[in-house]
């Protein structure tokens, strides 16, 4: 099954990254530049905080936040902004908007899993989407990085009163 998914991702031109900026910068920039002349509208999902929220990752994020004087996260991880900033810088001329998507699961609900879906068991998921015109985003790299971090502070506030965040993505 994993091979089928991997091959389908390869054929549909997913960008495979190694989570190392030194290795991924060139791959990301070349891949995003190819989208400039893409013949159809497209969605690009960037998971700036990663795709999995675990207690260990939260603890690491809290340690990092404390060492950097950042707000201490309780329900979200700290976004890694290099890829996001690079993506916006490259695609600003041809992408009209960024959609901030937050997917949250109420604390009293079971999270959706592949097994639950296959068993046709229901689950409750809340989705919050906000559109930002690219022209309204900060122009500088530092400004974009701070904007992204500020979004996550807002997500932490949004989620703190009733949700357990499962994952967050930015769709361009």
Image: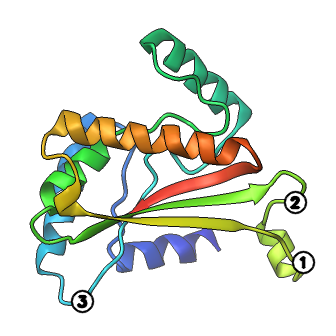
**Pointer 2 residue:** 110
Describe residue 30's horizontal placement relative to residue 81 as left or right: left
Quarter residue 133 falls in: bottom left
Q: Position of residue 79 (x, y in %)?
A: 44, 39
- Going 65% across and 74% down the picture, which residue do you hit? 1
Q: Is residue 72 above or below residue 166?
A: above
Q: Position of residue 120 (x, y in %)?
A: 87, 83
Q: Earlier in the sequence, mark 3 or mark 2?
A: 3
Q: Position of residue 53 (x, y in %)?
A: 65, 43
Describe residue 141's horizontal placement relative to residue 106 as left or right: left
Q: Report how far apart the C-alphas of labels 1 and 2 lie in the structure.
A: 10 Å
Dot 1 alpha-carbon crowd within 10 angstroms: few under 14, some 14 to 19, many 20 or more: few
* Residue 71 in sight: yes
Marks 3,1: beta carbons within 8 A: no
* Residue 30 in sight: no
Q: Position of residue 56 (x, y in %)?
A: 69, 29
Q: Earlier in the sequence, mark 1 or mark 2?
A: 2
**Pointer 1 residue:** 121
**Pointer 3 residue:** 40
Local SS, label 3: loop
Q: Is residue 133 above or below residue 39?
A: above
- Going 63% across and 31% down the picture, which residue do you hit? 57
Dot 2 alpha-carbon crowd within 10 angstroms: few under 14, some 14 to 19, many 20 or more: some
Q: Report how far apart the C-alphas of labels 3 and 2 lie in the structure.
A: 37 Å
Marks 1,2: beta carbons within 8 A: yes
């Amino acid at each position: 099954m994993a091979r089928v998914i991997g091959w389908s991702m390869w054929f549909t031109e997913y960008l495979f990254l190694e989570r190392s900026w030194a290795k991924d910068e060139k791959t990301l920039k070349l891949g995003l530049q190819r989208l400039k002349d893409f013949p159809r509208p497209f969605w690009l999902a960037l998971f700036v905080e990663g795709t999995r929220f675990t207690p260990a990752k939260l603890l690491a994020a809290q340690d990092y936040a404390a060492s950097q004087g950042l707000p201490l996260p309780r329900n979200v991880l700290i976004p890694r902004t290099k890829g996001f900033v690079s993506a916006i810088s490259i695609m600003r001329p041809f992408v009209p908007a960024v959609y901030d998507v937050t997917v949250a699961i109420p604390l009293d609900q079971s999270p959706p899993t592949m097994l639950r879906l296959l068993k046709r068991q229901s689950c409750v998921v809340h989705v919050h989407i906000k559109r930002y015109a690219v022209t309204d985003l900060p122009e500088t790299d530092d400004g974009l990085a701070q904007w992204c971090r500020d979004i996550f502070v807002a997500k932490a506030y949004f989620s703190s009163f009733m949700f357990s965040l499962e994952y967050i993505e930015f769709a361009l």
